[in-house]
Amino acid sequence: MNKLSSKKQISLAVSCALALGILSGVASAQTKPEDTAYLVDSRGAVVRSGYGLCWHTGYGPKANMPECDPAPVKVADATPTPPPPPPPAAKPAGGKVTLDADTLFDFDKAVLRPAGMQALDDFLVKMKDIDPEVIIAVGHADRFGSNAYNQNLSERRAASVKNYVMSKGIDANRIHTEGKGETQPVTKPGDCAGPKSAKVIACLQPDRRVEIEVVGTQIVK
């Protein structure tokens, strides 16, 4: 029994040795170090392990074979691209001017004179680099006349300014008008004392005025 078992073991060992010798001979016959560093079989296919890995022959560096050496995956640059700089912010802008009512209108009138139109044109030219959000026109009157009369006169003069500015292409919704009557004089009490006369009327001229203010943003060129 022991002799029979020993014969079987010797036979199995010889078979394994022959199989390995054949495989080694085939692989060696198909493998040339100058051609590839991977072990190939008789069909020219790369010999792989049980895990699907290519067998290296040990002859120098690995050859560049797509099935064994896939191209490395390019990793995207982790550095984010900075966003483009924002456009320059519009700068707040505006202007204010006080126009002599006697230049804009005849005395005690609310109809614009040619000289008054020119004065408004000059003002609008100075404001050409501003995108207006609102234009405010405030009318004032001197102390001669009743409070109600002066209030109405100041409002009509401010309205005349608005109408003229609208004729130059400014949207009516952007123009605000109001009248202050005689409530906000420029002259001080006692500066123009006395009854109504040409001299006193001339003295009170600074009180007869229209203040125009533009609020908007600077136009970026």
Image: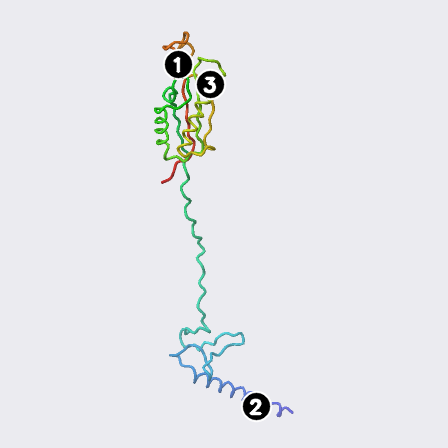
Residue 138 picture location, percent across and down:
44, 24
Mark 3 residue crowding within 10 angstroms, few (<14) / some (14–19) / many (20+): many
Give the label on residue 133, or none.
none
Q: Which is nearer the eye, 215 or 80?
A: 215
How far apart are the alpha carbons under marks 3 and 1?
14 Å
Q: Residue furthest right?
A: 1
Does the CB distance between marks 2 and 3 fall below 8 Å? no
- Mark 3 or mark 1, earlier in chain: 3
Give the label on residue 11, or none.
2
Give the label on residue 181, or none.
3
The number of callouts visible is 3
* Image vertical order of residue 133 relative to residue 198, above or below: below
Seen at 46% across and 26% down, the residue is 177
Q: Which residue is mark 1?
A: 204
Seen at 41% across and 13% down, the residue is 188
Residue 2 picture location, percent across and down:
63, 90
Task: Indicate the quadrant containing the N terminus: top left, top right, bottom left or bottom right.
Answer: bottom right
Seen at 43% across and 29% down, the residue is 163
How far apart are the alpha carbons under marks 2 and 3?
129 Å
Colouring style: rainbow
Question: For residue 212, what is the image quadrant?
Answer: top left
Q: Amino acid at mark 3?
A: Gly
Q: In screen coordinates, is 4 left or right of 64?
A: right
Residue 13 picture location, percent across and down:
55, 87
Q: SS class of the residue under badge 1? A: loop
